[in-house]
Structure formats: structure tokens, C-alpha cells
Image (cartoon, helix red, strand yellow):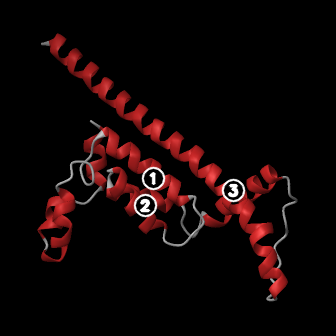
Amino acid sequence: MPRRFIRRYLPDIDKLLAKPSMAWARSIAADPNLLHLNRHSVSLAVAIGIFCAFIPVPGQTLIAIFLCYQLRANLVLGVVFIWISNPITIPPMFYLTYQLGALILGTEPLTLTVELDWQWFKNLGTEILMPLFLGSLLCAAVFSVAGYFTILYLWRWQVIKNWERRNQARRKQ
């Protein structure tokens, strides 16, 4: 099952929770979706992680933890998928989302020059942040929905493949 594949790469939750410093997290572990691996919690965690990765604000991890807790998605995978936006991928990712936002708003993309005066800060919000946030939210929505349904499909495909393999093994006996 897909669970075995994912468990290979995740830390053992029981060992982590046995540490005295993790006593505060033991109540979280009681929720069947927050730390356990099932089709719903994994696919939702992937969607939340991808969505938060595209949001151009600091504190993406805290936002993802909050959303995973509220929506009962796997916390660990939700945080792992935020790493799509890392120091290497952030510049091209946000440049492309800015270009998309500027295209949708019908504005001319700017070449960024930094001038530390009041007019530059005033124009920053309307000329740069609006297209960036619009493009980022659009990409976040599209890619998170695509990630959600991709994980659901791959999980189902793996389960069907395992059923077929077991049926063939039974027929050979």
C-alpha cells in the first residue's frame, strides 16, 4: 500500500511522542488523521502544503499547520510539501506568478528597481503586490487541487495494483 512507501521516509511517530519534550503533542496523535496515513489525510495534506507554498507571505509553515489541524490533514506531510518553495525555487516561482498576475490584471510587468523613497513604497502595493498575490493565489488553487486529485488517483491505483497482485498470487496456488 502507499502507506508503506510514505512510512519509509517519515519519522516513527510513536518514538517521537515517547520523548518527554513531546508530551504536548500526545493529544494531537489521538486524532486519526493528523499523524496517521490514510488516503484522505495524505491527499489533503499535499493540497494544503502546495497551497501554502505558493502564498508569498512569511510564516507559511504556521499557516499550513493551522490548516492541517483545522481540516484534519496529516501535519507532517502538510509541512513537508511547503518545501516546494525553498530558497532555490522561490525566485522563479514568484516571478512566474507575478507575470501571471500582471497578465490577468492587464498591467505591464515591471522591471524591478529599488528606490528607497515614499513613492516607490506606495507603488509597490499596486504595481507589484497585487499581481503577485493574484498570480500566487491562482497558482496555489490550481496546483493544490491538481495535487489533491493526483494523490487520490495514485493511492487508488496502488491499492488496485495490490489487489490484482494478490489475486494473481491466489490463482497460482
What's the distance in space between the residues labelled 2 and 3, CA to CA?
19 Å
Give residue 96's position: percent from left, percent from top: 71, 57
| Amino acid type for the residue under numbered disc 2 | Ala
Where 58 sits versus 89, above or below?
below
Chain-order first, disc 1 or disc 2: 1
| Amino acid type for the residue under numbered disc 3 | Leu
Callouts 1 and 2 close, C-beta under 8 Å: yes
What's the distance in space between the residues labelled 1 and 3, CA to CA?
18 Å
Position of the C terminus, as image quadrant, is: top left
Taking the spot 52% from the left edge, 54% from the top edge, the residue there is 51
Q: Residue furthest right?
A: 108
Q: Describe the element under mark 1 as helix, strand or loop.
A: helix
Q: Which residue is mark 1?
A: 48
Left or right: 135, with 159 as reference point: right
Q: Is residue 79 visible?
A: no
Give residue 42's position: percent from left, percent from top: 35, 45
What's the distance in space between the residues labelled 1 and 2, CA to CA?
6 Å
Chain-order first, disc 1 or disc 3: 1
Q: Which residue is mark 2?
A: 64
Q: Residue furthest top?
A: 171
Left or right: 73, with 7 as reference point: right
Q: Which one is closest to the eye, mark 1 or mark 3?
A: 3
Q: Is residue 43 visible?
A: yes
Give residue 160's position: percent from left, percent from top: 32, 23
Query: How would you rate the neighbour count of disc 1 (Cα within 10 Å): few for under 14, some for 14-19, many for 20 or more?
Result: many
Q: Nearer the viewer, residue 171 or 14?
A: 14
Q: Which residue is mark 3?
A: 134
